[in-house]
Amino acid sequence: MRKILMKTRQLTSMVLVLVLLAVAAPVFSQQDLHWATTWSMSPSSFPPAFPPAADAADTFTDQTLRQIIHTSAAGDTVRIRLSNIHGDKPLQIGAVTIALQAAGASIVAESLQALTFSQRSSFTIPRGAVAISDPISFAVPAMSNLSISIYLPAGSGAATSHLATQQTNYVSGSGDFSSSSDIPDASEIVVWNYLTAVDVGRNDAISTIVTVGDSITDGVGSSRDSNSRWPNFLVKRLASATDMPVFAVANAGLSGNRVLHENLPRFGENLQARFERDVLALSGVSHVVLMEGINDIGMVSMFPGEEVSADDIIAGYRQIIARVKARGIKIIGATLTPYEGAAYYNVQGENKRQQVNNWIRNSGEFDGVIDFEDALKDFTYPLQIISDFTADNLHPNDAGYEAMANVIDLDLFR
Protein backbone atom coordinates (compact mmCIF):
# COMPACT_ATOMS: atom_id res chain seq x y z
CA MET A 1 0.00 0.00 0.00
CA ARG A 2 2.87 2.37 0.87
CA LYS A 3 4.52 1.68 -2.51
CA ILE A 4 1.26 2.40 -4.30
CA LEU A 5 0.92 5.73 -2.44
CA MET A 6 4.51 6.69 -3.35
CA LYS A 7 3.93 5.87 -7.02
CA THR A 8 0.67 7.82 -6.98
CA ARG A 9 2.45 10.85 -5.48
CA GLN A 10 5.24 10.58 -8.09
CA LEU A 11 2.71 10.37 -10.91
CA THR A 12 0.79 13.33 -9.49
CA SER A 13 4.02 15.35 -9.28
CA MET A 14 4.90 14.53 -12.88
CA VAL A 15 1.44 15.55 -14.09
CA LEU A 16 1.70 18.79 -12.08
CA VAL A 17 5.09 19.58 -13.65
CA LEU A 18 3.70 18.94 -17.14
CA VAL A 19 0.69 21.16 -16.42
CA LEU A 20 2.95 23.95 -15.15
CA LEU A 21 5.16 23.66 -18.23
CA ALA A 22 2.12 23.80 -20.47
CA VAL A 23 0.88 26.91 -18.67
CA ALA A 24 4.32 28.53 -18.76
CA ALA A 25 4.77 27.90 -22.49
CA PRO A 26 2.71 30.38 -24.54
CA VAL A 27 0.74 29.18 -27.50
CA PHE A 28 2.74 31.58 -29.66
CA SER A 29 6.19 32.87 -28.73
CA GLN A 30 7.70 36.04 -30.22
CA GLN A 31 10.77 35.93 -28.02
CA ASP A 32 13.26 34.80 -30.64
CA LEU A 33 11.70 36.50 -33.66
CA HIS A 34 13.33 39.31 -35.60
CA TRP A 35 10.68 41.65 -37.01
CA ALA A 36 10.94 43.68 -40.21
CA THR A 37 8.42 45.68 -42.23
CA THR A 38 7.97 43.90 -45.55
CA TRP A 39 5.55 46.56 -46.88
CA SER A 40 4.32 49.96 -45.80
CA MET A 41 2.30 52.93 -46.99
CA SER A 42 2.31 56.53 -45.82
CA PRO A 43 -1.09 58.22 -45.47
CA SER A 44 -1.67 60.97 -48.02
CA SER A 45 -4.78 62.08 -46.17
CA PHE A 46 -4.68 64.95 -43.71
CA PRO A 47 -5.53 65.36 -40.02
CA PRO A 48 -9.16 66.45 -39.62
CA ALA A 49 -10.34 69.51 -37.80
CA PHE A 50 -10.97 68.78 -34.14
CA PRO A 51 -13.58 68.41 -32.82
CA PRO A 52 -14.91 66.66 -35.95
CA ALA A 53 -17.72 68.29 -37.86
CA ALA A 54 -21.15 66.88 -37.01
CA ASP A 55 -21.98 66.38 -40.69
CA ALA A 56 -18.72 64.62 -41.64
CA ALA A 57 -19.34 62.05 -44.38
CA ASP A 58 -18.62 58.33 -44.05
CA THR A 59 -16.25 56.95 -46.67
CA PHE A 60 -17.44 53.36 -46.07
CA THR A 61 -20.50 51.79 -44.41
CA ASP A 62 -21.15 48.03 -44.14
CA GLN A 63 -18.47 47.28 -46.75
CA THR A 64 -15.41 45.08 -47.15
CA LEU A 65 -12.08 46.41 -48.38
CA ARG A 66 -9.82 43.85 -50.04
CA GLN A 67 -6.39 45.42 -50.43
CA ILE A 68 -3.42 44.01 -52.30
CA ILE A 69 0.13 44.54 -51.09
CA HIS A 70 3.40 43.32 -52.60
CA THR A 71 5.88 41.93 -50.09
CA SER A 72 9.61 42.50 -50.11
CA ALA A 73 11.03 39.95 -47.63
CA ALA A 74 9.59 36.57 -46.66
CA GLY A 75 8.68 35.45 -43.15
CA ASP A 76 7.08 32.65 -41.18
CA THR A 77 5.04 34.98 -39.00
CA VAL A 78 3.00 38.05 -39.84
CA ARG A 79 1.30 41.01 -38.18
CA ILE A 80 -0.28 44.11 -39.69
CA ARG A 81 -0.95 47.71 -38.69
CA LEU A 82 -4.21 49.54 -39.20
CA SER A 83 -4.36 53.30 -38.76
CA ASN A 84 -7.15 55.74 -38.00
CA ILE A 85 -4.58 58.54 -37.73
CA HIS A 86 -6.55 60.85 -40.04
CA GLY A 87 -9.99 59.66 -39.07
CA ASP A 88 -12.55 62.06 -37.64
CA LYS A 89 -14.23 59.53 -35.35
CA PRO A 90 -13.58 56.07 -33.85
CA LEU A 91 -13.30 53.39 -36.54
CA GLN A 92 -15.27 50.18 -36.00
CA ILE A 93 -13.61 47.05 -37.41
CA GLY A 94 -15.84 44.02 -37.86
CA ALA A 95 -13.28 41.48 -39.13
CA VAL A 96 -9.80 41.34 -40.69
CA THR A 97 -8.32 38.46 -42.69
CA ILE A 98 -5.13 37.77 -44.60
CA ALA A 99 -4.56 35.44 -47.56
CA LEU A 100 -2.46 34.97 -50.66
CA GLN A 101 -3.95 36.73 -53.66
CA ALA A 102 -5.09 34.45 -56.48
CA ALA A 103 -6.17 37.02 -59.06
CA GLY A 104 -8.08 40.26 -58.78
CA ALA A 105 -10.37 40.18 -55.75
CA SER A 106 -10.09 36.39 -55.39
CA ILE A 107 -7.80 34.70 -52.86
CA VAL A 108 -6.13 31.32 -52.41
CA ALA A 109 -8.87 29.95 -50.14
CA GLU A 110 -6.70 27.49 -48.21
CA SER A 111 -4.33 30.31 -47.20
CA LEU A 112 -7.06 32.42 -45.55
CA GLN A 113 -6.56 33.23 -41.87
CA ALA A 114 -8.38 35.56 -39.52
CA LEU A 115 -6.44 38.24 -37.67
CA THR A 116 -7.14 39.40 -34.14
CA PHE A 117 -6.14 42.55 -32.28
CA SER A 118 -5.61 42.07 -28.54
CA GLN A 119 -7.33 38.71 -29.08
CA ARG A 120 -10.42 40.38 -30.53
CA SER A 121 -11.69 39.86 -34.05
CA SER A 122 -13.93 42.94 -33.89
CA PHE A 123 -12.80 46.12 -32.18
CA THR A 124 -12.65 49.90 -32.43
CA ILE A 125 -9.63 52.05 -33.30
CA PRO A 126 -9.87 55.43 -31.54
CA ARG A 127 -9.61 58.58 -33.61
CA GLY A 128 -5.94 59.24 -34.39
CA ALA A 129 -4.76 55.82 -33.19
CA VAL A 130 -3.01 52.77 -34.64
CA ALA A 131 -3.81 49.09 -34.00
CA ILE A 132 -1.30 46.23 -34.38
CA SER A 133 -2.59 42.72 -34.94
CA ASP A 134 -1.63 39.70 -32.87
CA PRO A 135 1.10 37.77 -34.72
CA ILE A 136 0.09 34.54 -36.43
CA SER A 137 2.01 31.77 -38.13
CA PHE A 138 1.65 32.49 -41.84
CA ALA A 139 4.09 31.69 -44.63
CA VAL A 140 4.68 35.07 -46.28
CA PRO A 141 6.51 34.64 -49.59
CA ALA A 142 9.03 37.22 -50.78
CA MET A 143 8.02 39.47 -53.69
CA SER A 144 4.45 38.14 -53.73
CA ASN A 145 0.97 39.59 -53.36
CA LEU A 146 -1.02 39.32 -50.15
CA SER A 147 -4.72 40.10 -49.93
CA ILE A 148 -5.85 41.76 -46.70
CA SER A 149 -9.58 42.19 -46.14
CA ILE A 150 -11.17 44.59 -43.67
CA TYR A 151 -14.88 44.60 -42.93
CA LEU A 152 -16.24 47.97 -41.80
CA PRO A 153 -19.70 47.37 -40.28
CA ALA A 154 -20.62 50.97 -39.50
CA GLY A 155 -19.99 54.42 -40.92
CA SER A 156 -16.22 54.87 -41.07
CA GLY A 157 -15.95 58.62 -41.06
CA ALA A 158 -13.05 60.06 -43.06
CA ALA A 159 -10.64 57.38 -44.27
CA THR A 160 -6.91 57.32 -43.56
CA SER A 161 -5.69 56.65 -47.09
CA HIS A 162 -2.91 56.66 -49.67
CA LEU A 163 -3.94 57.80 -53.14
CA ALA A 164 -1.02 57.14 -55.51
CA THR A 165 -0.83 53.36 -55.13
CA GLN A 166 -0.23 52.12 -58.71
CA GLN A 167 -2.15 49.10 -57.38
CA THR A 168 -5.71 47.88 -57.99
CA ASN A 169 -7.63 47.23 -54.78
CA TYR A 170 -11.25 46.29 -54.21
CA VAL A 171 -14.31 47.33 -52.23
CA SER A 172 -17.56 45.40 -51.91
CA GLY A 173 -21.13 46.49 -51.96
CA SER A 174 -22.92 45.86 -48.69
CA GLY A 175 -21.77 43.02 -46.46
CA ASP A 176 -18.91 41.14 -44.85
CA PHE A 177 -16.81 39.34 -47.47
CA SER A 178 -13.65 39.18 -45.37
CA SER A 179 -13.74 35.36 -45.31
CA SER A 180 -15.06 34.88 -48.85
CA SER A 181 -12.83 33.46 -51.56
CA ASP A 182 -14.04 36.20 -53.92
CA ILE A 183 -16.09 39.40 -53.85
CA PRO A 184 -18.51 39.03 -56.74
CA ASP A 185 -19.68 42.66 -56.86
CA ALA A 186 -16.32 44.24 -56.07
CA SER A 187 -15.52 47.68 -57.42
CA GLU A 188 -11.94 48.56 -58.27
CA ILE A 189 -10.23 51.38 -56.38
CA VAL A 190 -6.65 52.61 -56.73
CA VAL A 191 -6.31 53.59 -53.07
CA TRP A 192 -5.00 51.95 -49.90
CA ASN A 193 -7.15 52.63 -46.84
CA TYR A 194 -6.22 52.14 -43.16
CA LEU A 195 -3.57 49.46 -43.83
CA THR A 196 -0.19 51.10 -43.16
CA ALA A 197 2.29 48.25 -42.60
CA VAL A 198 2.79 44.51 -42.84
CA ASP A 199 5.56 43.02 -40.68
CA VAL A 200 7.19 39.63 -41.01
CA GLY A 201 8.88 37.72 -38.21
CA ARG A 202 11.83 35.39 -38.76
CA ASN A 203 14.22 33.43 -36.58
CA ASP A 204 17.26 34.61 -38.56
CA ALA A 205 18.62 38.14 -38.81
CA ILE A 206 16.65 40.61 -40.92
CA SER A 207 16.31 44.38 -41.01
CA THR A 208 14.40 47.02 -42.95
CA ILE A 209 15.55 49.61 -45.46
CA VAL A 210 13.01 52.46 -45.58
CA THR A 211 12.90 54.49 -48.79
CA VAL A 212 11.39 57.87 -48.01
CA GLY A 213 10.50 60.53 -50.54
CA ASP A 214 7.84 61.97 -52.81
CA SER A 215 6.06 60.72 -55.94
CA ILE A 216 9.27 59.41 -57.50
CA THR A 217 9.73 57.01 -54.58
CA ASP A 218 5.96 56.41 -54.52
CA GLY A 219 6.27 55.13 -58.10
CA VAL A 220 4.07 57.60 -59.97
CA GLY A 221 4.56 56.94 -63.69
CA SER A 222 5.10 53.20 -63.27
CA SER A 223 2.66 50.65 -64.68
CA ARG A 224 -0.27 49.72 -62.48
CA ASP A 225 -0.05 46.34 -60.71
CA SER A 226 3.46 45.73 -62.05
CA ASN A 227 5.39 46.68 -58.88
CA SER A 228 7.87 48.67 -60.94
CA ARG A 229 8.75 51.41 -58.46
CA TRP A 230 12.48 51.85 -57.88
CA PRO A 231 12.22 50.33 -54.35
CA ASN A 232 10.67 47.21 -55.95
CA PHE A 233 13.64 46.90 -58.29
CA LEU A 234 15.97 47.39 -55.32
CA VAL A 235 14.28 44.41 -53.63
CA LYS A 236 15.03 42.25 -56.66
CA ARG A 237 18.67 43.33 -56.68
CA LEU A 238 19.09 42.59 -52.98
CA ALA A 239 17.47 39.17 -53.36
CA SER A 240 19.71 38.19 -56.27
CA ALA A 241 22.90 39.21 -54.43
CA THR A 242 23.66 36.03 -52.51
CA ASP A 243 26.34 37.66 -50.35
CA MET A 244 24.02 40.33 -48.90
CA PRO A 245 22.30 40.29 -45.49
CA VAL A 246 18.54 39.75 -45.54
CA PHE A 247 16.61 43.00 -45.95
CA ALA A 248 12.99 44.02 -46.20
CA VAL A 249 12.30 47.25 -48.08
CA ALA A 250 9.47 49.51 -46.88
CA ASN A 251 8.29 52.32 -49.13
CA ALA A 252 7.53 55.61 -47.35
CA GLY A 253 7.15 57.57 -50.57
CA LEU A 254 4.28 60.03 -50.75
CA SER A 255 3.24 61.78 -53.94
CA GLY A 256 3.46 65.57 -53.74
CA ASN A 257 5.18 65.49 -50.36
CA ARG A 258 7.52 68.26 -49.26
CA VAL A 259 10.25 68.45 -46.65
CA LEU A 260 9.13 71.78 -45.24
CA HIS A 261 5.52 72.57 -46.16
CA GLU A 262 2.08 71.04 -46.61
CA ASN A 263 -1.00 72.41 -48.23
CA LEU A 264 -3.16 69.89 -50.05
CA PRO A 265 -4.57 66.83 -48.25
CA ARG A 266 -3.71 64.48 -51.12
CA PHE A 267 -0.01 65.25 -50.56
CA GLY A 268 -0.02 64.42 -46.86
CA GLU A 269 1.73 66.10 -43.98
CA ASN A 270 5.20 67.57 -44.45
CA LEU A 271 8.08 65.11 -44.13
CA GLN A 272 9.23 66.31 -40.73
CA ALA A 273 5.73 65.94 -39.30
CA ARG A 274 5.17 62.42 -40.66
CA PHE A 275 8.71 61.08 -40.27
CA GLU A 276 8.35 59.46 -36.86
CA ARG A 277 5.15 57.62 -37.83
CA ASP A 278 5.99 56.69 -41.43
CA VAL A 279 9.67 55.82 -41.03
CA LEU A 280 11.09 55.47 -37.52
CA ALA A 281 8.09 53.58 -36.14
CA LEU A 282 8.46 50.75 -38.66
CA SER A 283 9.96 47.44 -37.54
CA GLY A 284 13.64 46.58 -37.67
CA VAL A 285 14.82 49.73 -39.45
CA SER A 286 18.57 49.70 -40.11
CA HIS A 287 18.83 52.09 -43.10
CA VAL A 288 16.90 55.06 -44.47
CA VAL A 289 17.24 56.31 -48.05
CA LEU A 290 16.12 59.94 -48.36
CA MET A 291 15.14 61.48 -51.70
CA GLU A 292 12.83 64.45 -51.28
CA GLY A 293 12.90 68.17 -52.06
CA ILE A 294 11.96 68.62 -55.71
CA ASN A 295 8.40 69.60 -54.69
CA ASP A 296 9.74 72.14 -52.20
CA ILE A 297 11.55 73.68 -55.17
CA GLY A 298 8.84 73.35 -57.81
CA MET A 299 5.58 73.92 -55.94
CA VAL A 300 6.36 77.55 -55.26
CA SER A 301 4.48 78.14 -58.53
CA MET A 302 1.34 76.76 -56.81
CA PHE A 303 1.98 78.27 -53.37
CA PRO A 304 4.01 81.48 -53.83
CA GLY A 305 4.00 82.24 -50.12
CA GLU A 306 5.94 79.05 -49.42
CA GLU A 307 9.14 79.71 -51.36
CA VAL A 308 12.23 78.06 -49.89
CA SER A 309 15.95 78.34 -50.51
CA ALA A 310 18.43 75.52 -51.00
CA ASP A 311 19.70 76.25 -47.48
CA ASP A 312 16.16 75.84 -46.12
CA ILE A 313 15.89 72.38 -47.68
CA ILE A 314 19.34 71.44 -46.38
CA ALA A 315 18.33 72.56 -42.88
CA GLY A 316 15.33 70.24 -43.16
CA TYR A 317 17.62 67.38 -44.20
CA ARG A 318 19.81 68.02 -41.19
CA GLN A 319 16.83 67.62 -38.88
CA ILE A 320 15.97 64.28 -40.49
CA ILE A 321 19.62 63.14 -40.32
CA ALA A 322 19.80 64.01 -36.61
CA ARG A 323 16.62 62.06 -35.83
CA VAL A 324 17.79 59.00 -37.74
CA LYS A 325 21.28 58.94 -36.25
CA ALA A 326 19.86 59.36 -32.74
CA ARG A 327 18.30 55.91 -33.27
CA GLY A 328 21.58 54.36 -34.42
CA ILE A 329 20.21 54.01 -37.95
CA LYS A 330 22.20 54.76 -41.11
CA ILE A 331 20.88 57.37 -43.52
CA ILE A 332 21.74 57.54 -47.21
CA GLY A 333 21.08 60.68 -49.25
CA ALA A 334 19.91 60.49 -52.86
CA THR A 335 20.30 63.29 -55.37
CA LEU A 336 17.30 65.05 -56.89
CA THR A 337 16.68 64.05 -60.50
CA PRO A 338 16.47 66.41 -63.52
CA TYR A 339 13.12 68.06 -64.22
CA GLU A 340 13.43 70.53 -67.09
CA GLY A 341 10.23 70.23 -69.12
CA ALA A 342 8.11 69.41 -66.07
CA ALA A 343 5.08 71.61 -65.47
CA TYR A 344 6.66 73.49 -62.57
CA TYR A 345 10.22 73.84 -63.90
CA ASN A 346 12.00 77.19 -63.80
CA VAL A 347 15.62 78.33 -63.93
CA GLN A 348 15.65 79.54 -60.32
CA GLY A 349 14.41 76.15 -59.19
CA GLU A 350 17.09 74.39 -61.24
CA ASN A 351 19.77 76.46 -59.50
CA LYS A 352 18.38 75.36 -56.12
CA ARG A 353 18.37 71.71 -57.25
CA GLN A 354 22.03 71.95 -58.23
CA GLN A 355 22.93 73.51 -54.86
CA VAL A 356 21.06 70.81 -52.95
CA ASN A 357 22.64 68.02 -54.98
CA ASN A 358 26.10 69.48 -54.46
CA TRP A 359 25.51 69.44 -50.70
CA ILE A 360 24.17 65.86 -50.76
CA ARG A 361 27.25 64.65 -52.66
CA ASN A 362 29.91 66.59 -50.79
CA SER A 363 28.77 67.53 -47.28
CA GLY A 364 29.70 64.18 -45.72
CA GLU A 365 26.66 64.42 -43.43
CA PHE A 366 24.95 61.36 -44.89
CA ASP A 367 26.33 57.88 -44.29
CA GLY A 368 26.37 57.35 -48.05
CA VAL A 369 25.09 58.80 -51.31
CA ILE A 370 23.06 57.42 -54.23
CA ASP A 371 23.35 59.50 -57.39
CA PHE A 372 19.92 59.13 -58.96
CA GLU A 373 20.58 62.21 -61.10
CA ASP A 374 23.33 60.34 -62.94
CA ALA A 375 21.03 57.35 -63.40
CA LEU A 376 18.41 59.36 -65.29
CA LYS A 377 19.96 62.45 -66.86
CA ASP A 378 20.48 62.77 -70.57
CA PHE A 379 24.22 63.37 -70.79
CA THR A 380 23.77 65.27 -74.06
CA TYR A 381 21.38 67.63 -72.22
CA PRO A 382 21.83 67.03 -68.47
CA LEU A 383 18.93 69.21 -67.30
CA GLN A 384 16.48 66.64 -68.62
CA ILE A 385 15.67 62.99 -67.96
CA ILE A 386 16.44 60.62 -70.84
CA SER A 387 13.32 60.72 -73.01
CA ASP A 388 12.95 56.92 -72.99
CA PHE A 389 12.78 57.02 -69.19
CA THR A 390 9.88 59.46 -68.70
CA ALA A 391 6.53 60.60 -70.05
CA ASP A 392 6.29 63.94 -68.25
CA ASN A 393 9.93 65.02 -67.70
CA LEU A 394 9.53 64.55 -63.95
CA HIS A 395 8.46 60.98 -63.12
CA PRO A 396 10.36 57.98 -64.48
CA ASN A 397 8.59 55.12 -66.21
CA ASP A 398 9.26 51.44 -65.51
CA ALA A 399 12.58 51.53 -67.37
CA GLY A 400 13.61 54.70 -65.58
CA TYR A 401 12.83 53.25 -62.17
CA GLU A 402 14.85 50.16 -62.98
CA ALA A 403 17.78 52.38 -64.01
CA MET A 404 17.54 54.14 -60.66
CA ALA A 405 17.73 50.85 -58.75
CA ASN A 406 20.62 49.64 -60.90
CA VAL A 407 22.80 52.64 -59.99
CA ILE A 408 22.60 51.86 -56.25
CA ASP A 409 25.82 50.48 -54.74
CA LEU A 410 24.61 47.59 -52.59
CA ASP A 411 27.73 47.95 -50.42
CA LEU A 412 25.93 50.90 -48.81
CA PHE A 413 23.81 48.33 -46.96
CA ARG A 414 26.51 45.94 -45.80
Image: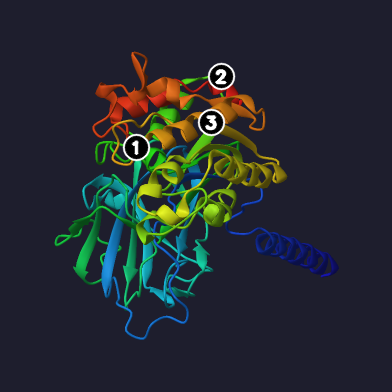
Question: Which residue is rendered at x = 25% and y = 65% of the image?
Answer: 177
Q: Amino acid at mark 2?
A: Asp
Seen in the picture, residue 50 relative to 324 is either above or below; the reply is below
Quadrant (top left, top right, bottom left, bottom right) of the N terminus: bottom right
Query: CB of mark 1 within 8 Å of CB of mark 3?
Result: no
Residue 218 vs residue 127: left or right?
left
Residue 3 vs residue 300: left or right?
right
Whether residue 245 is visible here, answered yes or no, is no
User: Which numbered dot is residue 345?
Assistant: 1
Question: Which residue is rendered at x = 45% and y = 20% of the image?
Answer: 407
Q: Position of residue 182 (x, y in %)?
A: 21, 56
Q: Nearer the viewer, mark 2 or mark 1?
A: 1
Question: Which residue is rendered at x = 56% and y = 19% of the image?
Answer: 243
User: Which numbered dot is residue 355?
Assistant: 3
Question: Which residue is rendered at x = 42% and y = 32% of the image?
Answer: 350
Determine whether the residue tagged by mark 2 lies in a helix, strand or loop: loop
Alpha carbon distance from label 1 to label 3: 16 Å
Chain-order first, disc 2 or disc 3: 2
Q: Amino acid at mark 1?
A: Tyr
Q: Which residue is mark 2?
A: 243
